[in-house]
Amino acid sequence: MENAHLRFGLLEYVRITEKASTRIRLRVDHYIGEDRQAHLLSVFGNDSDVGAITAAVHEKAAFSLTFPDGEMKEVSLGEHASCYKGTVTLPGRKHPVRHLLAVSQELHTNGSAGRTILLRYRREEAWATLVSFLGLPADPSWAEHILGIIEEKKRIEQFDGIGCSPVLITATTGEMLEWIGQGLRAGALNFPDNGGPIHWPRYPLPEVLVPMQVTA
């Protein structure tokens, strides 16, 4: 975990009322965003600061986000965002750290409207996610062919990210079924030889969230 602080972003929230001005700053370990629209925001701090940010998310407030490379953007999670809070106990620390994970409405219903957001892009992982979210009848071995079509059609867009390398894949269920049908008719895809259940590989979340190595 050497130089871990270099992988974090900084979230700043300023609230001004007639009687007082409040400025809150929290560290960001994971973030997914599309320009000014934040889709996932993971921050940690003390109880009062995390509580204030939670309230601000529900109020559709805007935040100032500084990325690890120094770039800054004003972002918001928009309407109907969901918040999940927890605690993290650290060795040698008297009080636990409060953690907040805020998710946009679109990410909460990921895959709807033909838009699927991924933490990172690997063909096998992307295919398993698309099949699950879009309800496709498919086989793991079809990943190379179908994702090749998606790449050729330039349906993959890089998103802003902290602690991950998120992408958006734009493809509807109807389009995917059409490409599968074309592949089967052309012989590029084949049904499994056996008639039993299809076993999909597992992708542990901690492996997906392994932070990039940062040197001083």
Image: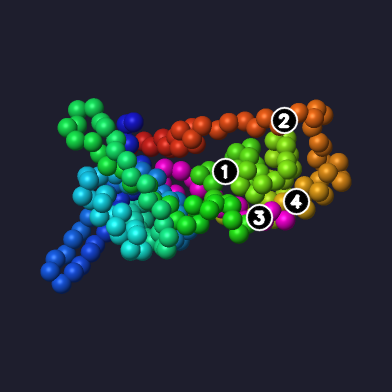
For the residue pair 49 and 146, the one nearer the viewer reads as 49
Distance CA(mark 3)–CA(mark 1): 15 Å
Mark 3 Cα within 10 Å, few/some/many (few <14, many 20+)? Answer: some
Residue 67 sits above or below residue 207 on the image: below
Question: On residue 177, which mark appears?
Answer: 4
Q: Is residue 159 magenta?
A: no
Mark pair 2, 4: CA separation:
20 Å
| Residue 126, visible in the rendered structure | no
Q: Position of residue 23 (x, y in %)?
A: 20, 58
Seen in the picture, residue 110 relative to 78 is either above or below; the reply is: above
- Local crowd at mark 1 within 10 Å, few (<14), some, or many (≥20)? some
Tell me the element at label 4: helix
Residue 120 placement, left or right of 214? right
Chain-order first, disc 3 or disc 2: 3
Q: Which mark is residue 109?
A: none
Q: In this figure, which residue is indicated by the disc labeled 1?
A: 121
Q: Residues within 10 Å of mark 2 (few under 14, many from 20)?
A: few
Give, as a three-letter code, the residue at label 3.
Ala
Number of marks: 4
Q: Secondary structure at mark 1?
A: loop
Q: Which residue is mark 3?
A: 171
Asked if residue 156 is positioned above or below residue 15 in the image, the reply reads above
Left or right, 190 with respect to 11, comes to right
Identify the residue under disc 2. Answer: 197
Specify which label sits upstream in the sequence, 3 or 4: 3
Residue 36 rendering spot, x and y as whole percentages:
42, 62
Looking at the rendering, the stretch of residues picked out in magenta corresponds to 160-174
User: Does residue 142 appear anywhere in the picture?
Assistant: yes
Distance (Cα) linking label 1 and label 2: 26 Å
Disc nearest the viewer among 3 and 2: 2
Q: Secondary structure at mark 3?
A: loop
